[in-house]
Amino acid sequence: MIVEMARRSLIGLGYTAILTFVILTIMTLQDIQVPVSIIWKNTLGGMVMGIYFGSASLIFDIEEWSPMKKTAVHFLISILIWLPLALWMGWLPLELAPILFGIGMFVIVYLLFWYGSYWYFKRIENQMNHSVKK
């Protein structure tokens, strides 16, 4: 379990590195100047999110839990990690309206990923069932 968590965390860091590189490349091409302290803070926050989302997928491997419980636990932990990071990194100002908007956007993005995963695994399931029926 620990080895798998470390492996998935490293995969999350890899995605973070690619995303950070793309963002920094766009900033360079647009000649956007940002203090190193802000880049450092956002990179650290991105790394924390990458490690979390990489390893948190282990929640879905707990066979004793229902899919609803897995999703609810994953969602709650995700928002409890994301919201303080978003506030600390300055993605959201510490005001009610922006925080509610940020939470709303988080829910929308989470639902998009959830539906995408659902339909992907549903397609895999149908392909497997079809191959067994042959």
Image (cartoon, rainbow, N blue to C red):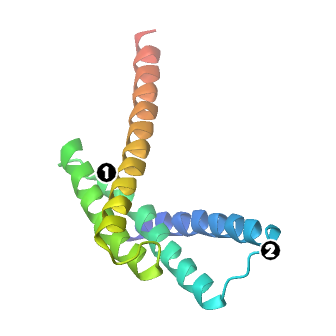
Please tell me whether residue 91 is drawn above or below residue 117 in the rendered image. Answer: below
| Residue annotated with mark 1 | 60
Foreground residue among 87 and 110? 87
**Amino acid type, callout 2:** Asp
Q: Position of residue 104 (x, y in %)?
A: 34, 54
- Kindly identify the residue that appears in the image at 37 percent across and 69 percent down: 82
Residue 76 in the image: state x and y as whole percent: 25, 61
Q: Residues within 10 Å of mark 1 (few under 14, many from 20)?
A: some
- Viewer-nearest of labels 1 and 2? 2
Residue found 62% across the figure and 82% down from its top:
39
Element on which disc 2 rests:
loop
Q: Report, in whole angstroms, how far the alpha carbon at label 1 lies from the one at label 2.
A: 42 Å
* Image quadrant where residue 97 sits: bottom left
Which residue bears the numbered disc 2?
31
The percent position of residue 113, horizontal first and vertical second, equals 43, 45
Q: Vertical placement of 132 versus 79: above or below?
A: above
Q: Is residue 22 visible?
A: yes
> Disc 1 marks which amino acid?
Phe
Q: Position of residue 33 (x, y in %)?
A: 73, 81
